[in-house]
Image: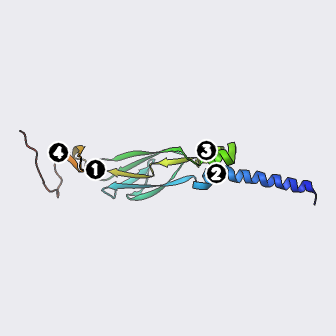
Amino acid sequence: MDSSIFRQLARIGLGASIVCLGACASIMHGTHQDVGISSSPSGAQVSVDGQITGKTPIVSNLTRKDNHIIHLELAGYKPYDTTVTRSVSGWVWGNIVFGGLIGLAVDAINGGLYKLTPEQVSGTLISSGAAGIAPSRDGLYVTVVLSPQPGWQKVGQLERD
Protein backbone atom coordinates (compact mmCIF):
# COMPACT_ATOMS: atom_id res chain seq x y z
CA MET A 1 0.00 0.00 0.00
CA ASP A 2 0.98 3.54 -0.66
CA SER A 3 2.10 5.72 2.28
CA SER A 4 -0.34 8.46 1.19
CA ILE A 5 -3.23 6.07 1.91
CA PHE A 6 -1.87 5.51 5.43
CA ARG A 7 -1.60 9.26 5.97
CA GLN A 8 -5.15 9.75 4.75
CA LEU A 9 -6.45 6.99 7.04
CA ALA A 10 -4.53 8.52 9.94
CA ARG A 11 -6.15 11.91 9.27
CA ILE A 12 -9.61 10.32 9.10
CA GLY A 13 -8.92 8.48 12.38
CA LEU A 14 -7.67 11.67 14.02
CA GLY A 15 -10.74 13.59 12.83
CA ALA A 16 -13.08 10.87 14.11
CA SER A 17 -11.27 10.86 17.47
CA ILE A 18 -11.65 14.63 17.82
CA VAL A 19 -15.38 14.44 17.07
CA CYS A 20 -15.87 11.53 19.51
CA LEU A 21 -13.83 13.12 22.30
CA GLY A 22 -15.11 16.60 21.50
CA ALA A 23 -18.30 16.33 23.52
CA CYS A 24 -16.49 15.44 26.73
CA ALA A 25 -19.22 16.46 29.20
CA SER A 26 -21.95 14.69 27.21
CA ILE A 27 -19.91 11.51 27.26
CA MET A 28 -18.92 11.76 30.93
CA HIS A 29 -22.25 12.65 32.56
CA GLY A 30 -24.89 12.71 29.84
CA THR A 31 -27.51 15.21 28.81
CA HIS A 32 -29.97 14.32 31.62
CA GLN A 33 -29.60 14.31 35.41
CA ASP A 34 -31.52 12.50 38.13
CA VAL A 35 -32.98 14.88 40.74
CA GLY A 36 -34.52 13.44 43.91
CA ILE A 37 -37.77 15.09 45.02
CA SER A 38 -39.27 14.51 48.47
CA SER A 39 -41.75 16.26 50.73
CA SER A 40 -42.80 16.37 54.34
CA PRO A 41 -45.43 14.96 54.57
CA SER A 42 -44.77 12.54 51.72
CA GLY A 43 -47.28 11.62 49.04
CA ALA A 44 -47.49 15.08 47.46
CA GLN A 45 -48.22 15.30 43.75
CA VAL A 46 -45.11 16.39 41.82
CA SER A 47 -45.23 18.52 38.67
CA VAL A 48 -42.09 19.41 36.75
CA ASP A 49 -42.48 22.25 34.26
CA GLY A 50 -46.26 21.88 34.43
CA GLN A 51 -46.25 18.12 33.74
CA ILE A 52 -47.38 15.72 36.50
CA THR A 53 -44.58 13.21 37.12
CA GLY A 54 -45.78 11.27 40.19
CA LYS A 55 -45.89 11.50 43.99
CA THR A 56 -43.13 12.10 46.53
CA PRO A 57 -40.65 10.59 47.04
CA ILE A 58 -39.62 10.37 43.38
CA VAL A 59 -36.52 10.66 41.22
CA SER A 60 -37.03 12.72 38.04
CA ASN A 61 -34.68 12.47 35.08
CA LEU A 62 -34.39 16.10 33.91
CA THR A 63 -32.65 17.64 30.91
CA ARG A 64 -29.48 19.47 31.87
CA LYS A 65 -29.92 22.26 29.30
CA ASP A 66 -32.98 23.86 30.95
CA ASN A 67 -34.01 25.29 34.31
CA HIS A 68 -36.98 23.41 35.79
CA ILE A 69 -39.86 24.51 38.02
CA ILE A 70 -40.89 21.89 40.60
CA HIS A 71 -44.39 22.16 42.08
CA LEU A 72 -45.55 20.03 45.05
CA GLU A 73 -49.22 19.84 45.98
CA LEU A 74 -51.08 17.92 48.70
CA ALA A 75 -54.69 18.34 49.87
CA GLY A 76 -54.89 20.36 53.09
CA TYR A 77 -51.46 21.99 52.52
CA LYS A 78 -50.20 25.08 50.75
CA PRO A 79 -48.39 24.29 47.48
CA TYR A 80 -44.59 24.34 47.42
CA ASP A 81 -42.64 25.67 44.42
CA THR A 82 -38.92 25.75 43.74
CA THR A 83 -36.61 26.02 40.76
CA VAL A 84 -33.81 23.66 39.79
CA THR A 85 -31.26 25.75 37.90
CA ARG A 86 -28.50 24.91 35.49
CA SER A 87 -24.92 26.04 35.86
CA VAL A 88 -21.75 25.25 33.95
CA SER A 89 -20.28 21.85 34.79
CA GLY A 90 -16.62 21.27 35.61
CA TRP A 91 -16.43 19.06 32.51
CA VAL A 92 -16.18 22.24 30.44
CA TRP A 93 -12.42 22.10 31.15
CA GLY A 94 -12.25 18.70 29.47
CA ASN A 95 -13.77 20.27 26.39
CA ILE A 96 -11.32 23.13 26.41
CA VAL A 97 -8.35 20.74 26.69
CA PHE A 98 -9.54 17.89 24.45
CA GLY A 99 -12.46 18.99 22.34
CA GLY A 100 -11.91 22.66 21.68
CA LEU A 101 -14.70 24.70 20.15
CA ILE A 102 -16.38 21.68 18.57
CA GLY A 103 -16.76 19.97 21.94
CA LEU A 104 -18.00 23.14 23.62
CA ALA A 105 -20.55 23.69 20.86
CA VAL A 106 -21.85 20.10 20.98
CA ASP A 107 -22.17 20.14 24.78
CA ALA A 108 -23.81 23.57 24.81
CA ILE A 109 -26.41 22.48 22.25
CA ASN A 110 -27.33 19.14 23.86
CA GLY A 111 -27.02 20.34 27.49
CA GLY A 112 -24.05 18.18 28.51
CA LEU A 113 -22.17 21.35 29.43
CA TYR A 114 -24.43 21.95 32.45
CA LYS A 115 -25.27 20.51 35.86
CA LEU A 116 -28.52 20.98 37.77
CA THR A 117 -28.65 22.30 41.33
CA PRO A 118 -29.91 21.34 43.78
CA GLU A 119 -29.58 17.61 43.13
CA GLN A 120 -32.13 16.91 45.89
CA VAL A 121 -35.34 18.90 46.41
CA SER A 122 -37.09 18.55 49.76
CA GLY A 123 -40.22 20.59 50.30
CA THR A 124 -41.85 21.11 53.70
CA LEU A 125 -45.55 21.53 53.09
CA ILE A 126 -47.37 23.94 55.40
CA SER A 127 -50.92 23.25 56.54
CA SER A 128 -53.33 25.47 54.61
CA GLY A 129 -54.71 26.77 57.93
CA ALA A 130 -51.28 27.95 59.16
CA ALA A 131 -50.82 31.68 59.59
CA GLY A 132 -47.05 31.68 60.07
CA ILE A 133 -43.98 29.71 61.03
CA ALA A 134 -41.10 30.75 63.25
CA PRO A 135 -38.06 28.45 63.60
CA SER A 136 -36.68 28.08 67.11
CA ARG A 137 -33.06 27.51 68.19
CA ASP A 138 -33.47 23.78 68.86
CA GLY A 139 -34.86 22.98 65.38
CA LEU A 140 -38.52 22.79 66.44
CA TYR A 141 -41.12 24.80 64.61
CA VAL A 142 -44.02 26.75 66.07
CA THR A 143 -47.04 26.93 63.79
CA VAL A 144 -49.83 29.43 64.37
CA VAL A 145 -53.15 28.19 63.01
CA LEU A 146 -56.61 29.68 62.76
CA SER A 147 -58.30 26.39 63.62
CA PRO A 148 -56.79 23.07 64.71
CA GLN A 149 -57.17 19.97 62.59
CA PRO A 150 -58.85 16.87 64.02
CA GLY A 151 -56.31 14.52 65.56
CA TRP A 152 -53.97 17.26 66.77
CA GLN A 153 -53.01 17.10 70.43
CA LYS A 154 -52.96 20.34 72.41
CA VAL A 155 -49.61 20.77 74.18
CA GLY A 156 -49.88 24.39 75.31
CA GLN A 157 -51.64 27.71 74.93
CA LEU A 158 -50.40 31.28 74.80
CA GLU A 159 -51.89 33.73 77.29
CA ARG A 160 -51.75 37.51 77.59
CA ASP A 161 -49.78 39.13 80.44
Direction top: furthest residue: 161
Q: Amino acid at mark 4?
A: Leu
Whichever of labels 4 and 2 marks the residue nearer the N terminus, that label is 2
Q: Nearer the viewer, residue 4 or 151?
A: 4
Q: Is residue 52 visible?
A: yes
Along the horizontal axis of the image, is 142 left or right of 38?
left
**Label 2 crowd bin: few (<14), some (14–19), many (20+), radius 10 Å:** many
**Amino acid at pointer 2:** Cys
Q: Position of residue 34 (x, y in %)?
A: 49, 56
Q: CA distance from mark 1 to mark 2?
A: 44 Å
| Mark 3: amino acid | Ala
Residue 24, numbered label? 2
Residue 83: x and y, percent? 43, 44
Dot 1: element: loop
Disc 1 marks which residue?
77
Circle 3 residue: 108
Instruction: Give the total of numbered labels.
Output: 4
Mark 4 sits on what residue? Answer: 146
Foreground disc of the pair 2, 3: 2
> What is the spatial separation of the Cα atoms under label 1 and label 3, in whole angstroms?
39 Å
Q: Quadrant of the N terminus?
A: bottom right
Between label 1 and label 3, give the one nearer the viewer.
3
The first of marks 2 and 3 along the sequence is: 2
Mark 4 vs mark 1, CA separation in Å? 14 Å
Q: Residues within 10 Å of mark 3 (few under 14, many from 20)?
A: many
Query: Which type of secondary structure does the marked residue at label 3 adopt?
Result: helix
